[in-house]
Image (tube, rainbow, N blue to C red):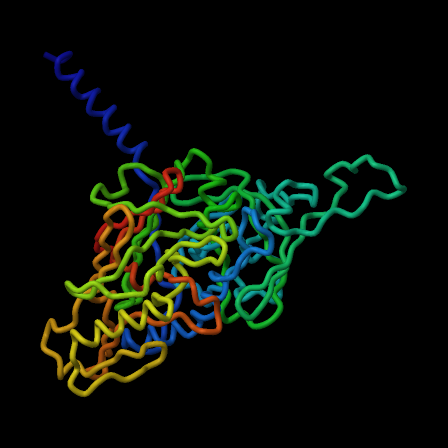
């Protein structure tokens, strides 16, 4: 009897061990900025003021066709979400901004008298920290300075130990930073990734208000990004569920790996690749609907074109979704037609379709659905479609037209519209998935 009982028990333990091994690593995702206004509408308007810089970054092309990496710094200002990570041995805790449209990870390092925080990563306190020389194969990817020419006219390359560290400088928002290329152990939850290559920031020039306080975690698609450096650890998959702006005490989650933590109900659409902006996650949007009515847009409005950058990008750093001028005009017209606000519509910040909710019957605002290849119909929750003021009976359509001062061919599905939705980035299988989830 004892032997009979032991065998199923051993099988159960093996199954439990396999389940734990297959589970995706999970980290909490936190709001990075706490606006002074308690009203969601006013808070979003304040956060979205810096979207133009982000959109300019997303719509710009790499200087050289075929370049496999995006610029180290992004136009994100300020970062919307952060995760807690560890860097070094022993581990030093840092809050790193999430950025799906940048490859490189970087951290403010001591000594640095111009960095935005006094809480800096201390390379001197890490036994696993190593500076990378200008001869490193990583240096060109970070657009670092080339090694000096050999002295005396000889062709023989000097040993790496005698070469200067790979140094680079990059713009970020209204500032720029200077950094040295380095490697160290990156810890995400219980996972440790040794020899992780990152930029160690030593000085910042210009205002630091819109810079991440401690650093940035690059989640793009290039060779410098987390999935590439992690190798088989995460099998080319990560997902996040972003918490709502309704409360800045809400937190979401970042899941790393293709294990049991990823949802089974997810619906996937193909992930497109732009060789000029290879870090960005493009999807093919086939249409929009408001309520049950399809939005009538000009033919080719959503077409993907690598040469011009046209198409639709899923991005974690832009606050409100932007559509190109003809798409947004058609969406706005259909939304206004169905809401039929008696007193008409006003503009507030980036929003131009705000109305008096006292004049519209409860449930009168229609849902917006984004349709994509693969039969994906992303029906946005009402709180992702309509933002209410807590001070007045006012609500606004939570989307806007792409600014005219940037490349206006790019549509961006932004973080406000992704809240309380599990978004799965499966780079290994070139697909992006969506599933409803309450992640607050």
In the image: residue 113, left or right of residue 418: right
- Identity of the residue drawn at 32% across and 40% down: 24
In the image: residue 371, left or right of residue 68: left
- Identity of the residue drawn at 36% across and 52% down: 283
**Which quadrant holds the C terminus?**
bottom left
| Residue 329 appears in view | yes
Note whether 73 is above or below 362 in the view shown.
above
- Identity of the residue drawn at 16% across and 74% down: 338
Locate residue 54, reporting x and y percent: 46, 65
| Residue 111 appears in view | no
Instruction: Give the number of marks.
Output: 0
**Which quadrant holds the N terminus?**
top left
Between residue 92 and residue 95, name the one nearer to us.
95
Note whether 370 is above or below 161 in the view shown.
below
In the image: residue 341, left or right of residue 148: left
Residue at the extreme right of the image, as rendered: 152
Locate residue 208, reporting x and y percent: 54, 69
Between residue 241 and residue 279, name the one nearer to us.
279
In the image: residue 312, left or right of residue 90: left
Residue at the extreme bottom of the image, as rendered: 343
Locate residue 373, reporting x and y percent: 29, 49
Between residue 160 and residue 108, name the one nearer to us.
160
- Identity of the residue drawn at 35% across and 67% down: 320
Locate residue 362, reporting x and y percent: 10, 74
Between residue 343 and residue 150, name the one nearer to us.
343
Residue at the extreme front of the image, as rendered: 299
């Amino acid at each position: 009897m004892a032997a009979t009982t032991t065998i199923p028990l051993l099988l159960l333990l093996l199954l439990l061990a396999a389940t734990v091994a297959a589970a995706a690593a999970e980290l909490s995702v936190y709001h990075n900025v706490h606006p002074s206004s308690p009203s969601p509408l006013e808070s979003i308007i304040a956060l979205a003021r810096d979207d133009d810089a982000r959109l300019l970054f997303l719509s710009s092309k790499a200087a050289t066709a075929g370049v496999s990496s995006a610029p180290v710094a992004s136009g994100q200002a300020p970062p919307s979400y952060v995760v807690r990570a560890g860097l070094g041995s022993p581990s030093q805790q840092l809050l790193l901004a999430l950025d799906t449209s940048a490859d490189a990870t970087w951290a403010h390092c001591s000594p640095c008298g111009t960095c935005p925080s006094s809480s800096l990563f201390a390379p001197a306190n890490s036994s696993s920290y190593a500076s990378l020389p200008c001869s490193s194969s990583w240096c060109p990817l970070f657009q670092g300075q080339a090694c000096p020419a050999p002295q005396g006219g000889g062709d023989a390359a000097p040993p790496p130990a005698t070469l200067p560290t790979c140094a680079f400088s990059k713009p970020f928002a209204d500032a720029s930073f200077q950094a040295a290329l380095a490697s160290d152990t990156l810890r995400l939850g219980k996972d440790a990734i040794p020899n992780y290559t990152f930029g160690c920031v030593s000085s910042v020039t210009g205002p630091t208000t819109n810079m991440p306080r401690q650093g940035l975690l690059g989640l793009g698609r290039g060779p410098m990004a987390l999935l590439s450096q992690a190798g088989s650890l995460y099998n080319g998959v990560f997902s996040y569920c972003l918490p709502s702006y309704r409360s800045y005490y809400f937190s979401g989650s970042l899941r790393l790996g293709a294990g049991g933590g990823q949802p089974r109900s997810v619906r996937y659409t193909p992930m497109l690749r732009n060789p000029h902006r290879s870090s960005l996650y493009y999807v093919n949007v086939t249409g929009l609907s408001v309520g049950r009515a399809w939005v009538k847009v000009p033919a080719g409005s959503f077409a993907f074109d690598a040469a011009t950058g046209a198409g639709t990008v899923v991005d974690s750093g832009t606050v409100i979704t932007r559509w190109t001028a003809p798409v947004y005009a058609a969406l706005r017209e259909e939304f206004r037609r169905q809401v039929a606000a008696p007193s008409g519509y006003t503009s507030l910040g980036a929003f131009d379709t705000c109305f008096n909710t006292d004049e519209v019957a409860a449930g009168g605002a229609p849902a917006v659905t984004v349709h994509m290849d693969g039969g994906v119909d992303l029906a946005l929750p009402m709180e992702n479609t309509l933002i209410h003021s807590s001070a007045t009976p006012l609500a606004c359509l939570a989307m806007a037209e792409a600014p005219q001062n940037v490349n206006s061919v790019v549509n961006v599905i932004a973080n406000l519209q992704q809240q309380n939705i599990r978004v799965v980035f499966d780079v290994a299988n070139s697909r992006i998935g969506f599933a409803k989830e309450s992640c607050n």
